[in-house]
Image (cartoon, coloured by chain):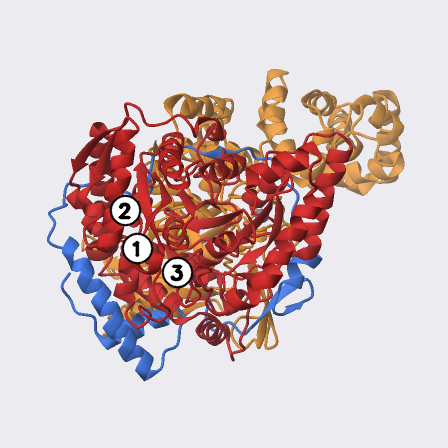
Amino acid sequence: MTSPLHRDDVAHVAKLARLSLSEEELALYTDQLGQILEHANDMSTLQLDDVIPTAHPFGLINVVRDDSVRESLDRDVVLAMAPDAEDGRFAVPRIMGEAP
Amino acid sequence: MKTAEQIALDVRSGASTAQRELDASLAAIHARNDELNVFLYVDEDGARAAAKDVDDKVARGESVGPLAGVPVAIKDNMCQVGVPTTCSSRILEGWRPPYSATVITRLLAAGAVPVGKTNLDEFAMGSSTENSAFGPTRNPLDPSRVPGGSSGGSAAAVAADMTPIALGSDTGGSIRQPAALCGLIGVKPSYGLVSRYGLIAFASSLDQIGPFSKTVTDAAILLEAIAGHDPMDSTSLPEPAPMLSAHVNDGVVGKRIALVRELIDGADPDVVASVTRAVEVLKDAGATILELSIPELQLGLSAYYLIAPAEASSNLARYDGVRFGLRVDGEDVEAMNTATRTAGFGAEVKRRIMLGTYALSAGYFDAYYGQALKVRTQMIDAFKRAYAQADLLIGATAPSVAFPFGSKTSNPMAMYLSDVFTIPTNLAGEAAISVPFGAGEAGLPTGVQLLGPGRSEAQLFAAARVLEREERGS
Amino acid sequence: MTLPGSWEMVVGLEVHTELKTATKMFCGCANHFGAEPNTNVCPVCLGLPGSLPVLNERAVELAMAIGIALHSTIAPSTFHRKNYFYPDMPKDFQISQYDLPINSGGYLDLPDGSRVSIERAHLEEDTGKSTHLGGSGRIHGADRSLVDYNRSGVPLVEIVSGPDIRSSAQARAYAAELRGILIATGASDGRMEEGSMRIDANVSVRKSGEPFGTRCEIKNLNSLRSLHRAIDYEALRQVELIESGGVVRQETRHWDENLGVTSTMRTKEEAEDYRYFREPDLVDLAPEQAWQDRIRLALPPMPAERRAALKERLIAPTPAQLDAVEVVIDLNLEQFVNAAIDADIDPVLALARAANELAGGLEGIGNLTPEAFCATLRLEQSGQLSATQAKTVLGELLAHGGEPGAIAAAKGFEQLSSDSLGSTVESLIAQNPDEWARYREGDEKLAQFFIGQVMKLTKGKANGKAVVAELQSRR
Ligand SMILES: [Mg+2]
Ligand SMILES: [Zn+2]
């Protein structure tokens, strides 16, 4: 967990997050994110193998709703939000690959 | 300005009208909004319609709610149908939600009059409201200083007497810290007490909506109006809203209140002095005081700055230029997504998205995000042990009084440290309140924080009221 | 198809089935195929800021029903987010189950007696649907795409088999049997052509007895025929690649139905980093025993059990009759066959009429009662209706319902009395002496000639069997 952040890590993460960074931004973020991760190293020395991770503050279970239909939004309202729409659908530039 | 409690009384009795109260609020907004940059949008037409509706009901002798005619400011990360909602981000500029958050629906049902949307750190990421794409908000008590954040606009609205109450959201301290810096009551309710439906997510497992006010009673009335189970939020607590305003004067006799060393360590001496004096006041009011050390709290910041960005990186993926909000063209979908997000998000949002993406990515998950979730477990356990010994905990809300603009913007870590005392409550899903108590540098207010276990709001309000009575003399 | 030499294919299937709920997985929008684009959408299934998911109880119950039918263990489960950007996925993450699925383990027995293990059957949400404009209408070469989110958030169960399948025929049988189970549980309508059941296949090859080879995942198999063809193509491709000195790379491949080939979609190196983590907007799912039992008790018998029960009622069934049993079970028609057998109608006749006439008129099956079916077959069996007439009556019953006797009467199907049939046959014998002579000498084919002539004269009212009896008596 003491891996100091590398410029390429930040570049990779930016690509995953669909952000494009200039060289200066890359350098700055590498430095700043590195500092934050270094601060997080105070957790790395803890022996927590037996601790159960908490993803939720408390344990509600089986929260479900009835399978009954509620009114949907009006399509004109929906498409009015769209940056681009055509033929009742949201329009996007070409998609380069199939969904994973 | 009148309290919300007083306005509602006057409107119900006919001594005033909702429209008259709204005019006063709008006048105060128009007088100082250009200077302070509190409201991003003032919904005059909507507010006038809501106020008229309340007045009509009063005239017809119909029942009006506990917030009848009370103007309320709404942090601009809560959806209100037809009203621009931006999260202070270019990426949502101009977006008008086709639906309302549950809290908005409940406010209207309680007779409140939402007057507009207040400034925040972009997507609630920040502690000074300097990260807004639409300029910083100034602290009404000293316009050369920040109001705190991320709910700085809502805090400033109440501090500048634009509205008696406001809604903020608190993910790591974003209500309590600006409340402290602006001299207000600010409440972070137990996780699940207030519905998150329609609150634009920052970090889903930490976010809670809560009140700002000048009095404990007003905060209690507002929280009662918005709390209680909501079937639209799977993490909503199953029970109806608790009785809070009826218990504000219950006092602290026999309560065990623990001063926690880790919740004052590193705070400015003025702040520590205020906490120390608050402890004396509570003791004089009949509480049993003890001192505790909870070393796990020191890990809160590290865990928080992995968990919150991790959730945020996923929550903010949907801002992709496809369905709503900003689109910057690109030759294919990926290029369009990237151009949109690069242009639409500010620096702090990008920083946290990248941090969270990194913490979740293959090869780093266990070391960072996974470890942080375990630390979270430890923090919850540590709080449980503390609450076996004490009913409530006490410490500082923020390490210092309101700080000058730009003093922490160049160093993210320095800014993050503003939340060191507030973060643990969010990680544990528990409740806390910041009470204005005492003063520090330049006569600016200091905040004292009272913490309690989940569903302890009534006890927190009662203890806060003891401090309030001492401070205000009423 | 068999692979050359001692090569053997190793196949595991991932079947996605849309659940037949009234509403979507996490919102109250209608789960309805074929609606106008973007009319069944709301803040939740559009992924609008501030929206939150709430789990559909019925989707959970149908997932449990599938698990029970597949002999899985229903366990406490969680939801995760699978993060990747794609325009038909509104939140840019899919809510799915990851390390703790609702159903784990289990198996499916195929009609040929083989058993395929089930690894898991988990809940997840479907995506929207893209239409590609420009180019050939396919994703490659298109210049823009249009997205409809009606399907976004429709509940899915993904059923993952073990790598137990050894032939394309077995893969097909597995998919068909699974489809029958999904229909029987009420979880799905099994309509592959509408995309409500979609299959991905993991295919590798090895020499028998050796460890598994590197596998490729084939996407986009939307019919049993595609599944069969794609697996054969892919297995052979891998064998030929290895035999010519190449190495199979782990990758995702796309099946092109028109060209009949698979092609590289994405290599392992290009694989997404999905950054799975617990969905913080949903709580854990831990169906208590009483809830599980309610679902278990409400489950109707599964196809294998029904198939066995029906076969029991046949004496020494022929292969054709066994095929008819498959059809009857697949189409849920055995109540008609059973009622007929109970009423002493020949099981072979009942099976044939159900597998052909009823199967051909399924859209009207609601108009037909088992009683009317039995009454029609009784008329046929007793010779009061010819086979052709009985089929016509069944067609009418399927189209409009009614009473078989009345339909037969209305169509003028009253059988000729044997007296008048006898005289018709005699006059035909007199008019066709050469044909009659050949028939008497043993040429049985000539019986058909006389039947045809009688039918012509009686406008189809005669019963073929009765004509033969008249001919025999005069031979
Ligand atoms: Mg899947
Ligand atoms: Zn929906």
The residue that disc 2 covers is B274
Disc nearer the start of the sequence (3/1): 3
The residue that disc 3 covers is B125
Q: Which chain is tinted red?
A: B
Residue C277 spot, x, y in % from top left: 33, 51
Confirm whether circles 3 and 1 share one chain.
yes
Q: Which amino acid, mark 3?
A: Met
Residue B162 spot, x, y in % from top left: 56, 54
For label 3, the crowd category at 10 Å Cα-Cα, with few meaning under 14, some 14 to 19 and many 20 or more, is: many
Residue B114 spot, x, y in % from top left: 61, 49
Provide the chain ID for the residue under circle 2.
B
Chain C color in figure = orange
For label 1, the crowd category at 10 Å Cα-Cα, with few meaning under 14, some 14 to 19 and many 20 or more, is: many
Name the element at disc 1: loop
Q: Which amino acid, mark 1?
A: Gly
Provide the chain ID for the residue under circle 3.
B
